[in-house]
Amino acid sequence: MTGEIAVAWRLARGYRLRPWQSPYLRWRIETWSGLHADAITRGIFWRFVWRHRHELSRYLAWAAKESGG
């Protein structure tokens, strides 16, 4: 689990207190869901995270494994 947290921490770099404003995370949500990145607000971001929490958890576990963490 700490590996997943480390990956999430790296992905939110520069936007850790406001991850919905991260250009990288907006782009990832846009490519995954089809939502336009400019339309992603705090509420949309957190609803997306909640609805896709299982997929996001699997992705973070995979990314941690791949990065050796």
Image (spheres, helix red, strand yellow):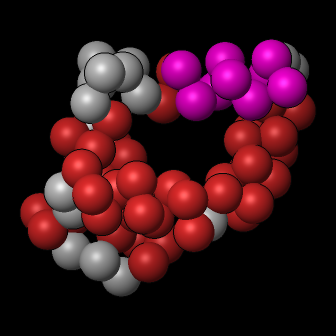
- Quick check: 39 above or below 66? below
> Dividing the picture into quarters, in which one does residue 6 lie?
top right
The number of numbered badges drawn on the structure is: 0
Residue 54 shows in this picture: yes
Q: Nearer the viewer, residue 36 or 50?
A: 50
Q: Which of 11 and 18 is in front in this view?
A: 18
Please name the predominant secondary structure of the magenta segment in the image: helix
Q: Residue at x 45, y 64 (%)?
A: 48
> Dividing the picture into quarters, in which one does residue 40 lie?
bottom left
> Dividing the picture into quarters, in which one does residue 30 lie?
bottom left
Magenta span: 1-9
Q: Residue at x 26, y 38 (%)?
A: 22
Residue 64 % position (x, y): 79, 30
Q: Which residue is drawn at 75% across and 49% down?
A: 57
Residue 5 % position (x, y): 68, 23
Q: Residue at x 51, y 56 (%)?
A: 49
